[in-house]
Image (cartoon, rainbow, N blue to C red):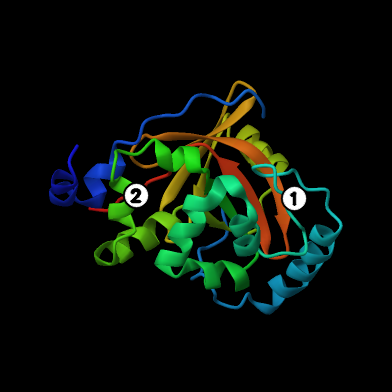
Amino acid sequence: MTARLLLLMGPAMVLAACSTPNVPKAATAPQPRSIGTPPPRSAATGLSAMMAAAATATNPYVGGAKMMGTRTIADNCAAAPNLRQLARALNAGGGRAALSSAGPITVFAPSDAAFGRLAPGAVDQLLAPANRAALAKVLNYHVVPGAITLADLRARIDAGGGRTQLTTLDGEPLLAARDGDAVALTDVNGNKSYVETPDVQQVNGVIHVVNGLLVPRLG
């Protein structure tokens, strides 16, 4: 696919046809709130408790890098060698500052391999200044209000009879379900992504590294 054709198709068509990654070997939502908006007073106490727990958490390594529970989501994403494309997207879309202050939130962080499954040139197109609005929607589609651990997510799935619907930051739905021992996320376009590295605790929320890009309605 040529760069000219990518430009003619636009980000919606290019991203909507993401390929479904392989299943990894291992392993009613809160109302959405604009990223960076201070939490209500009732959430502040919970956030303080989460920050204290994250500071002493034993986090999994991500891309071989140690994930410090005393860091923000943005800082740990920037430190992970296999989340460089996500860090690049956050910088281009102005999301890095937001993910440094917002919370508590859960981020399903697509790995570099997830971005690599897009059509050639699609990432550069999405990060182009002209497509900043589409980029913001894609990034927000990976964020769910509240700190949701893998155990929490599995409990919701079990309570829902095998699946549960999450509401992302922009109010778009995201389906979570069991796929054998794995947890699969399905976007509104039918693309699947699997949780690869769960429960990376941060001072402002939780990261779950996923192996596919999630795409909202962009048209």
Compared with residue 198, is residue 179 higher up or lower down, i.e. above or below?
above
Question: How many marks can you see?
Answer: 2
Residue that carries the numbered disc 1 in the rendered image:
66
Whole-percent x and y of residue 90? 47, 62
Task: Give the residue type at disc 2.
Answer: Val
How far is mark 1 from mark 2, CA to CA? 27 Å
Question: Could you tell me if residue 28 is visible in this image?
Answer: no
Between 161 and 149, the one lying in front of the other is 149
Residue occupying image coordinates x 34% and y 36% = 18
Compared with residue 96, is residue 198 higher up or lower down, i.e. above or below?
above
Residue occupying image coordinates x 63% and y 74% = 39
Between 195 and 161, the one lying in front of the other is 195
**Looking at the rendered structure, which numbered label has been put on residue 135?**
none
1 or 2: tag closer to the N-terminus: 1
Q: Secondary structure at mark 1?
A: loop
Q: Secondary structure at mark 2?
A: helix
Q: Residues within 10 Å of mark 1 (few under 14, many from 20)?
A: some
Whole-percent x and y of residue 2? 17, 41
Residue that carries the numbered disc 2 in the rendered image:
123
Whole-percent x and y of residue 92? 41, 65
Whole-percent x and y of residue 172? 41, 53
Instruction: Answer left or right for 171 relative to 103.
Output: left
Quadrant assignment, res 156: top right
Instruction: Answer left or right for 16 relative to 139.
Output: left
Question: Could you tell me if residue 148 is visible in this image?
Answer: yes
Task: Give the residue type at disc 1.
Answer: Lys
